[in-house]
Image: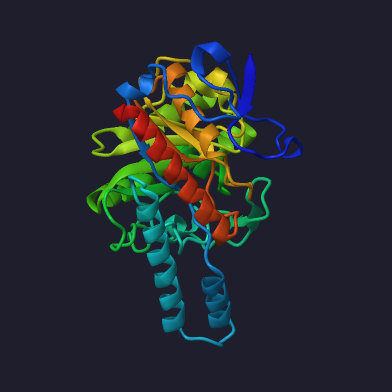
Amino acid sequence: MTAWRCSAVPESRRPHRATISLPLGATLSLPLWGRVGWGFCSKLSTINVFAYQHGIYPRSEKVVASTRGLDRGRVDADAVEAAFAEDLAAFVRLQQKSGLDVFSDGLLRWQDIFRPLVEALGAAKPESLVRWFDTNTFFREPELSGALAGVNHAVGLMPDASVPRPRVATLPSPFMFSRAARTDRDRNQLMVDLAGKVLRPVVDAAVAAGCQLVHLEDPWIGYFGIESKDWAPLREALELLHRDLRATLAFHVYFGDAGPHVDQLRRLPVDAIGVDLVETDVNELGSGWDKGLVAGVIDGRSSMLESLENTVEVARHLADTVRPRNLYLSSNCELAFLPTVVAEQKVQRLGEAAKRVKQLVSV
């Protein structure tokens, strides 16, 4: 048996990693350190392959400097707007040149994944800064005690009009939203209310604005887990988002091993399940999926660039074993933790891998 990993990150950095054990003669025509072999029949010929970048993308130094300068009275608002516009244009060009299939605005104006949504609720301004899992970034804890009102505007919540179509909208999952909030309410009821009163109106507006893919981020399940009693209300919340939706709904678990939750995840009323392949053993994913798979093949927490050959092999192995309806290639988490220049290289590598995988489809 030959084992290999989805990205070239040192073992000391990888306590739980995506190990794929492959019978050498059954799936590979050449050793893994050599050229990838194309000489066998792959299930890739029967599925669609897409590539996109979800989540918050890192801001450039110019944007960071201009926003700080505005706070200190050194630059005006026009300079900040110009810096953001340059960042957005650069990110759009990067996605296009990399050959991605669905486009994002990188949530460049979002301070964290919750704040624009909380502002749209007219809720109390969050005060407490909370560490974003085990990263060096922080979010403002949403204050959601008492009755939950619906969103009162969509300003700042939609992808920028300059982003090409089809577009992807990234939002927090209702489960993570309800767990990250400060509240005096039952969290499962809050989860259902967030889905119906907050997320669904935003999702509908996003679809009307050209989003064909809605990506729900849920690192909470990956990092902290989920109790068995919480699955039923989670399904109820997601059904509110999925019912009559004219877009693909993806539910993405990361910052942890999705393996223990695969059976429950596959029962969720969504179109695709996302997994962190840096943390998840691919052999735990099962086979014969009736959903799409968002494969987190790019490591958003490591500055080391993934091997193109190994990334392509990940996709090919997933197609042959998991056999999802559609295969979506993306990063295992948002790229906001990386320097912009590194994030650019990661997106380029994602596009290169997707192009190679699509060539397999056409063979």
Residue 183 in percent (x, y) is at: 56, 47
Q: Residue at x 68, y 46 (%)?
A: 134
Residue 260 in percent (x, y) is at: 58, 21
Q: Nearer the viewer, residue 183 or 11?
A: 11
Q: Is residue 81 left or right of residue 281?
A: left
* Residue 325 sits above or below residue 345 on the image: above
Q: Is residue 193 visible?
A: no
Q: Quadrant of residue 279?
A: top right
Q: How many marks?
A: 0
Q: Residue at x 25, y 54 (%)?
A: 209
Q: Nearer the viewer, residue 237 or 86?
A: 86
Q: Is residue 130 visible?
A: yes
* Residue 205 sits above or below residue 34 on the image: below
How has the structure been colored for display? rainbow
Quadrant (top left, top right, bottom left, bottom right) of the C terminus: top left
Quadrant (top left, top right, bottom left, bottom right) of the N terminus: top right
Residue 39 in percent (x, y) is at: 42, 19
Q: Nearer the viewer, residue 80 or 327?
A: 327
Q: Is residue 193 left or right of residue 72?
A: left
Q: Is residue 304 left or right of residue 117?
A: right
Q: Residue at x 50, y 44 (%)?
A: 177
Residue situated furthest right in the rendering:
12
Residue 335 in percent (x, y) is at: 54, 51
